[in-house]
Structures are given as C-alpha cells and as structure tokens.
Amino acid sequence: MASWSDISSYINFAGLILDFIGFIILLREWWIAYLSQQQELELYQKRFRQEQLDQLQQNNQSNLSPQLQKHMEMVKNQRGKTQTMEEMKDIATKLKSRRGLYVIATALIMGGFLMQIVASIPFLGD
C-alpha cells in the first residue's frame, strides 16, 4: 500500500496539472478578448469612414429631389440597423460560448489549488 507521502505527491502533481490547464484556457480567453477589441476598433474606424463618405455623398446630393433624398436616407438607415443587429447577434453568440470556457478554467484552477493544499497538509500522513 502506498504511503501518504507518495499519494500526496500525486495529488500535488495533479493539482499543478489542473492549474496549468486552467491557466492556459484563461490565457486563450484573454487573447481572444484582446483580438476582439482590435476588431471592434477596426469596426468603429470603418463606421467613421463610412459616415464621412455618407456625409460627403449627402452634400453632393443637395441638387436631388427631396423624395429621392428621403428614400436614400431611409435605405442608409435600414442598412445601418441591419448591420448593427447582425453584429449584436455575433457578439452575443461569441460571449455565450466563451462563458462556459471561463467557468471551466476557473474550476480547474480552483480544483488544482485545493488539491495542492490537501497534498501539503502534513498531519494527514501521521
């Protein structure tokens, strides 16, 4: 039969492995969040450029009929609403899938930490 010293070494090792796996998952999530923020910045820059272009077009269309101007404005508004809705759905889907990984990573880190504590208690071997 194995002694407590042998068992505690295995528990400690398993705890370290769980900590490492949990940390790698969290590191991956942090990296994804960083890349997501970069994409969001690029999206805002793209919207800014599109708004500037729309403003320029609107200034050039001042000689068009009021009905045509109104129609073009409605098309532009609808395009913006559709694009915003699609972006919101995409973000919600990504957040849902990432929440589960975050919970798993946190549980692994906590489990690994507890295993290391149990393995280091000296009076259990006596």
Image: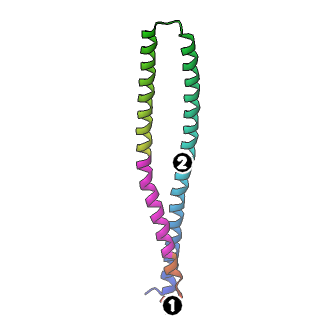
Question: Depth-wise, is mark 1 or mark 2 nearer the camera?
Answer: 2
Q: Amino acid at mark 1?
A: Phe
Q: How many marks?
A: 2
Residue 82 in the image: state x and y as whole percent.
41, 29
Please tell me whether residue 113 belongs to the stretch shown in magenta. yes
Residue identified by numbered label 2: 33
Residue 83 coordinates in the image, percent (x, y): 44, 30
Magenta segment range?
Answer: 95-115
Q: Residue sitting at 55 percent across and 52 percent down?
A: 30
- Indicate left or right for 97 with 21 as reference: left
- Check disc 1 and report the residue beneath it: 123
Tell me where residue 53 sits by quadrant: top right
Q: Nearer the viewer, residue 55 or 104?
A: 55
Q: In this rendering, is residue 70 above or below 110?
A: above
Q: Is residue 42 magenta?
A: no
- Dot 1 or dot 2, earlier in sequence: 2
Image position, residue 124 (x, y; %)? 48, 88
| Residue at image location 45% in from the left, 36% down from the top | 87
